[in-house]
C-alpha cells in the first residue's frame, strides 16, 4: 500500500475530520516534495526542521500553518510509520496577537444587503448563530429544528456535535430555503439523481438515506456531479470557495 493511502486510512480510522485529513495530506505531500520525494524513513528531524524553516523564511507561511504542517508530519511519523520524532526538538511558531476587526450592526446590515442569495442567508446564519462556514454548509435538512429554533451541527470542531441557536428573524428565510431544496431534490429524483454523500458507512446500512430529502444539504451546490465509481448523480453542499 502506498504511503499516502496509509496516511488517509489512518486518519479515517482515528476519526479525524475530512478537513483535517485534507490539510494533513496536503502538508505531508509538500514535505515529501521538498525532500525530493525521498521516503520519510530515510529522513528525520533535520529534514523536518529544514522544511519548517523553508515555510517560515521563504514561503512566509503564517504561524498557525507552520504548526499545522509540523503536526501533520509528526502524525505521519508516529501513527503511520511507527517512528515518532522528538517533539521537543521543535519550537512551535508563535502566533502574533492582533485586535480583531469588528463590524458594527449598521455595517453588518449593509454587507448582508449587498450579498446575493444564498450567500446572504449563509452569512446571516454565520453572524446570527455563531457558526463556522464549513459547519453551516454541512447542515442537512434533518438538522434544522424550527420548533426549538436550533441548528444541529454534526462533527464540528474537534469532531463534536453541538447546537446553534437559529435567530427568530431568520426562520422565514430558512423555511423558504428548505422549500427550494425540496423542489430541487424532487427535480433531481425525476432526472434519476437525488443522491447525496453520507457519513461513514450509512449508505450501506440505510441505502434509502442517500436519496432521502432529510439528508440533503440546506445549502446545496448549483449542480450535481457524477461519482466516477458508482455513476450516481450526487449533489454536494455549496463549496466554501463559492460563498
Image (cartoon, rainbow, N blue to C red):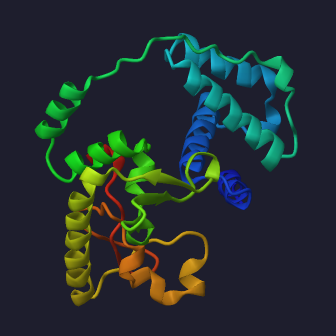
Give the quadrant of the N terminus. bottom right
Does residue 201 show up? yes
| Residue at screen point 35% across, 47% down | 240
Instruction: Give the vertical position of 127 relative to 181 (above or below).
Output: above
Name the foreground residue: 125 vs 147.
147
- Is residue 43 shown left or right of residue 128? right
| Residue at screen point 60% across, 23% down | 66
- Is residue 238 shown left or right of residue 200? left
Instruction: Give the vertical position of 10 relative to 241 (above or below).
Output: below
Locate residue 25, reporting x and y percent.
60, 45
- Is residue 64 shown left or right of residue 227? right
Name the foreground residue: 14 vs 186.
186
Locate residue 81, reporting x and y percent.
82, 46
The quadrant where residue 28 appears: top right
How many numbered marks appear? 0
Locate residue 34, reporting x and y percent.
60, 28
Name the foreground residue: 29 vs 67.
67
Locate residue 5, reporting x and y percent.
66, 57
Give the quadrant of the C terminus. top left
Instruction: Give the vertical position of 17 relative to 177 (above or below).
Output: above
Does residue 35 show up? no
| Residue at screen point 39% across, 60% down | 149
Amino acid at each position: 500500500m502506498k504511503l499516502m493511502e496509509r496516511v488517509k486510512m489512518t486518519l479515517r480510522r482515528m476519526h479525524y475530520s475530512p478537513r483535517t485529513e485534507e490539510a494533513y495530506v496536503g502538508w505531508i505531500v509538500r514535505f515529501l516534495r521538498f525532500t525530493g520525494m525521498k521516503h520519510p524513513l530515510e529522513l528525520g528531524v533535520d529534514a523536518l526542521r529544514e522544511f519548517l524553516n523553508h515555510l517560515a523564511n521563504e514561503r512566509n507561511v503564517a504561524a498557525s500553518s507552520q504548526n499545522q504542517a509540523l503536526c501533520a508530519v509528526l502524525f505521519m511519523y508516529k501513527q503511520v510509520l511507527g517512528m515518532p520524532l522528538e517533539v521537543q526538538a521543535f519550537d512551535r511558531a508563535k502566533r502574533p496577537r492582533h485586535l480583531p476587526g469588528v463590524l458594527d450592526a449598521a455595517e453588518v446590515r449593509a454587507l448582508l444587503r449587498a450579498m446575493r442569495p444564498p450567500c446572504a442567508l449563509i452569512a446571516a446564519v454565520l453572524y446570527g448563530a455563531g457558526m463556522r462556514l464549513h459547519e453551516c454548509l454541512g447542515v442537512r435538512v434533518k438538522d434544522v429544528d424550527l420548533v426549538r429554533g436550533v441548528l444541529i451541527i454534526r462533527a464540528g470542531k474537534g469532531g463534536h456535535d453541538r447546537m446553534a441557536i437559529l435567530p427568530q428573524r431568520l426562520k422565514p428565510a430558512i423555511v423558504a430555503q428548505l422549500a427550494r431544496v425540496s423542489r430541487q431534490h424532487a427535480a433531481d429524483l425525476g432526472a434519476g439523481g437525488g443522491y447525496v454523500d453520507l457519513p461513514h458507512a450509512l449508505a450501506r446500512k440505510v441505502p434509502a438515506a442517500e436519496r432521502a430529502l432529510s439528508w440533503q444539504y440546506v445549502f446545496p451546490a448549483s449542480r450535481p456531479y457524477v461519482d466516477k465509481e458508482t455513476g450516481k448523480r450526487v449533489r454536494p453542499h455549496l463549496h466554501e470557495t463559492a460563498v
